[in-house]
Image: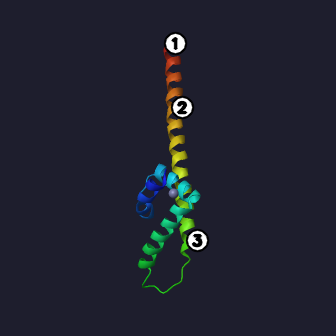
């Protein structure tokens, strides 16, 4: 993912509306790109700041944002691996079933 794509997806990332693959690419990019991380921080600050204007509680937006990036990244990685394992299981079961059925017809 390049900076242009990344900046286009900031709003979607903050709204949790990216798919797993896009989330992984996005998180990897902002972790390694200072410019996009800064842009994301500003957007996050504006969004969250406005939401919490009424509540006078203090908040640490930088660590909250880092936590959000890490959580999203881990969840996306988990779903990606989970999907892979599911597909692998289905293929394995189909293969074993095929093997089983073929032995039935041999004898
Ligand atoms: Zn960038």
- In space, the residues marked 1 and 2 are separated at their CA atoms by 21 Å
Give the residue drawn at x 58%, y 59%.
31
Q: Which mark is residue 92?
A: 2
Element at label 2? helix
Of badges 1 and 2, the one in the foreground is: 2
Q: Single out the residue that lies furthest toward the bottom.
A: 56
Q: Position of residue 68 (x, y in %)?
A: 53, 65
Q: Check if mark 2's residue and mark 3's residue have beta carbons within 8 Å.
A: no
From the viewer's perspective, is residue 56 above or below residue 44?
A: below
Q: Earlier in the sequence, mark 1 or mark 3?
A: 3
Q: Earlier in the sequence, mark 2 or mark 3?
A: 3
Left/right placement of residue 17 relative to residue 37 reads: left
Q: Which of the 4 quarters of the picture holds residue 17?
A: bottom left
Of badges 2 and 3, the one in the foreground is: 3
Give the residue drawn at x 57%, y 66%.
66
Q: Position of residue 28 (x, y in %)?
A: 55, 54
Q: Assess disc 1: are there few (<14), some (14-19) or many (≥20) residues with their C-alpha within 10 Å of its C-alpha.
A: few
Element at label 3? helix
Query: What residue does disc 3 label?
Result: 63
Q: Which mark is residue 106?
A: 1
Q: Position of residue 26 (x, y in %)?
A: 50, 55
- In space, the residues marked 1 and 3 are separated at their CA atoms by 64 Å
Q: Earlier in the sequence, mark 1 or mark 2?
A: 2
Q: Position of residue 89 (x, y in %)?
A: 53, 37
Q: Which of the 4 quarters of the picture holds residue 13?
A: bottom left
């Amino acid at each position: 993912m390049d900076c242009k794509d990344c900046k286009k997806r900031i709003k979607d990332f903050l709204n949790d509306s990216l798919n797993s693959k896009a989330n992984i690419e996005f998180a990897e990019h902002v972790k390694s790109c200072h410019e996009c991380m800064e842009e994301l921080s500003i957007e996050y600050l504006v969004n969250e700041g406005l939401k919490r204007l009424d509540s006078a509680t203090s908040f640490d937006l930088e660590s909250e944002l880092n936590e959000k990036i890490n959580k999203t990244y881990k969840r996306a990685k988990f779903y990606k691996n989970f999907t892979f394992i599911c597909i692998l299981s289905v293929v394995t079961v189909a293969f074993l079933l095929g093997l089983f059925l073929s032995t039935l017809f041999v004898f």
